[in-house]
Amino acid sequence: MEKFSGLDFYNIDQHLSDEERMVQDLCRSWVEARVLPIIEGHARNGTFPMELVKEIGEMGLLGANLEGYGCAGMSNIAYGLICQELERGDSGIRSFVSVQGSLAMFPIWKFGTEDQKNKYLPKLAAGEFIGCFGLTEPDHGSNPGGMLTRAVDDGDSYVLNGAKMWITNGSLADVAVVWAKLDGDIRGFIIEKGDPGFSAPEMKGKHSLRASVTSELVFEDCRIPKNRMLPEVRGLRGPFSCLNNARFGISWGALGAAMACYHSSVQYALSRVQFDKPIAGRQLVQNKLAWMLREITKGQLLALHLGQAKDDGSITPPMISLAKMNNVDIALQIARVARDIHGANGILDEYPIMRHMANLESVITYEGTHDIHNLILGRHITGMQAFF
Ligand code: TGC
Ligand code: FAD
């Protein structure tokens, strides 16, 4: 297949800074050289490519939009572009970077003590430590406010009991940012690998995000020192502030998966001959390709404007919901249409289509399901919440 050289029908590049263009090019070539040759094998075997972690750290992609403590301090648009390029490789690689930067590093950076920041952030930024984020529980997914995990004050320690589920990077993580109720208030705690009473068994049997590790986090009288609580936040505002960042990254990332499916579809349609003519010359096929380009371009404009709003501070959570919901939804639809254009070949792992399609089935559910984002928008429009 012809090498991917970017998709920029509306010349969005002209709005990027030199640094943003540079990081996009860097990630694009890195994905081409380091991710694409190995990712199908990892997806087939259900393994995460650990060998890439240090390189990702060295490129400054972990906590890229955070300042200080070894982080690269890039713009939010640069962070979005990183997510887009990585997810063109695989949603699992983007997930790794989202979770590490937006969900493990961000809460420590925003709500942690100086000691906590100095201890964890430089190592997380360098890829020497892996982080995860434990919010979801077996019986509390869309409604994390109902969580059952509890922390109890016990002398110079907190003791945690409960379980988290569906945690990206869980079994790999050196550091887990975990949300639990202390005296009825949701608080953030930093759990380290090896803490007594803590285990992180990997979840198996996934048909989606196979090149990403997903785990349970189990706390059985897990005792941690008191200086591991994040002091500066209480309530759901804590985890939701982290989700704002991760959802922002996903709204860019999903476009990368969509671009991979579009690129493969154009190449395939040009080379596949039926009834003595490339299928690319048929109106019905062109209609599908034109629709893909249209939706990707609209998604890019949404993502770019959202990035500008995040950089100038005017972004709001409902704006993020609209972009996450729209861009993941169109990416999933594009993957399905791409599968159709590839005919039977579309189901083979010689093409990236089914891998992206299966991955996007997780992406449309995690970080708030499609309908939860609909309801967030509904509440914004009407002032009436329809969750319960
Ligand atoms: P609600 O009453 O709306 O809010 C409770 C408190 O939180 C504040 N808040 C926010 N703060 C910052 N950013 C936001 N986006 C916020 N949204 C709400 C709010 O102001 C309030 O603060 P306060 O001080 O007044 O108490 O809470 P609710 O319980 O009614 O929530 C409603 C709902 C459904 C929107 C929320 O629960 C929700 O978003 N559910 C979806 C759960 C979710 O997204 N889970 C994601 C888990 S992590 C994950 O999936 C990682 S996958 C990573 C990967 O591999 O890439
Ligand atoms: P449910 O909440 O049970 O939803 C099931 C269905 O009911 C959905 O269609 C939903 O839209 C609908 N629904 C729910 N409530 C309402 C309502 N009020 N009105 C109308 N419809 C409703 N979580 C973490 O904390 N950390 C992670 O790192 C993480 N990584 C993940 C990785 C993967 C691969 C996956 C699949 C999930 C991950 N998650 C993680 C969990 C993810 O955030 C949850 O799966 C998600 O929030 C949805 O929760 P649920 O699966 O329990 O679905």
Image (cartoon, rainbow, N blue to C red):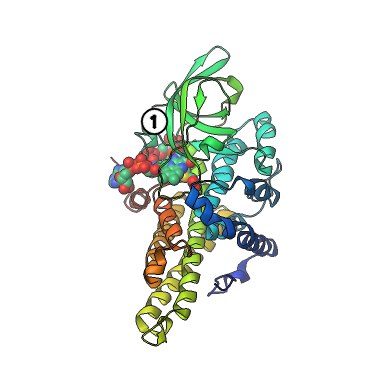
The answer to which of 68 and 296 lies nearer the viewer is 296
Residue 245 percent coordinates (x, y): 53, 48
Give the residue number, with chain letter if any, for mark 1.
147
Residue 349 percent coordinates (x, y): 46, 61
Q: Which residue shows up at 69% across the image and 61% down it?
A: 19
Label 1 Cα crowd, 10 Å radius (few <14 / some 14-19 / many 20+) = many
The answer to which of 113 and 347 lies nearer the viewer is 347
Residue 41 visible, this angle: yes
- Mark 1 vs ligand 2: CB below 8 Å: no
- All told, the count of numbered labels is 1
The quadrant of the image that shows the N terminus is bottom right
Residue 218 percent coordinates (x, y): 46, 27
Residue 338 visible, this angle: no
Residue 110 percent coordinates (x, y): 60, 38
Q: Which amino acid type corresponds to the residue marked 1 in the rendered image?
A: Met
Classify the position of ligand 2 by quadrant: top left, top right, bottom left or bottom right: top left
Q: Which residue shows up at 54% across the image and 55% down it?
A: 39
The quadrant of the image that shows the C terminus is top left
Depicted 165 relative to depicted 381: above or below: above
The answer to which of 68 and 136 lies nearer the viewer is 136
Q: Which residue shows up at 56% across the image and 28% down it?
A: 191
Depicted 352 relative to depicted 166: above or below: below
Specify the farthest residue to the top.
155
Helix, strand or loop at label 1? It is loop
The answer to which of 268 and 31 lies nearer the viewer is 268
Specify the farthest residue to the bottom.
276
Depicted 364 relative to depicted 300: above or below: above
